[in-house]
Amino acid sequence: QVQLAESGGGLVQAGGSLTLSCTASSRMFGIGLSINSMAWFRQAPGKQRELVASMSRGGRANYADSVKGRFTIVRDNAKNTAYLQMNSLKPDDTAVYYCSAYTSGSSRYWGQGTQVTVSS
């Protein structure tokens, strides 16, 4: 089992910035289990959950077109932590943001979600 703890959500005005963080923990880390990729998804009311950004263990990043140039995913493998730096926020970015980790055991885990609200 892997637990993901998220933080950093909140209310911000359009044009502002927020940084989300997500730390993965497991008693199996270091004894055969590791994280392959970490990602951020978001889900707005009435919409499907969508991928925002992901990063492989080797550092390859992938972004949704809607956030390219504004959001940056950063990963600290030693700390099993991923960050999502969000700049130039828009009201359309309002959603619950979920951290996700895909492990070497081919399992995906999810955080509890953190609310990001961007006011116009």
Image (spheres, rainbow, N blue to C red):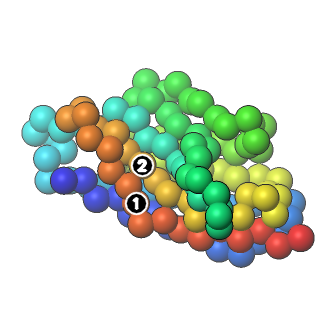
Percent coordinates x, y for residue 65 in the rendering? 73, 35
Of marks 1 and 2, which one's residue comes earlier in the chain? 2
Q: Residues within 10 Å of mark 1 (few under 14, many from 20)?
A: many
Q: Residue at x 65, y 51 (%)?
A: 85
* Residue 113 point in image, percent of width and height: 48, 65
Q: From this viewpoint, is residue 63 visible?
A: yes
Whether 113 is drawn above or below 24: the answer is below
Q: Quadrant of the C terminus?
A: bottom right
Q: Amino acid at mark 2?
A: Ser
In this picture, residue 43 sits left or right of residue 99: right
Dot 2 falls on a residue whose secondary structure is: strand
* Kind of residue at disc 1: Gly
Q: Residues within 10 Å of mark 2 (few under 14, many from 20)?
A: many
Which is more toward the observer, 94 or 45? Answer: 45
Q: CA distance from mark 1 to mark 2?
A: 6 Å
What residue do we see at 49% from left, 43% from top?
A: 39
- Residue drawn 38% across and 55% down? 110
Q: Which mark is residue 111?
A: 1
Tell me the quarter of the picture where residue 3 sits: bottom left
Q: Residue at x 71, y 75 (%)?
A: 11
Q: Position of residue 87 (x, y in %)?
A: 77, 52
Q: Is residue 90 left or right of residue 104?
A: right
Answer yes or no: is residue 95 visible: no
**Image coordinates for residue 17, horizontal then vertical, percent:** 75, 60
Q: Depth check: 13 or 94 in front? A: 94
Circles 1, 2 touching at the beta carbon (< 8 Å): yes
Q: Name the residue carrying label 2.
A: 100
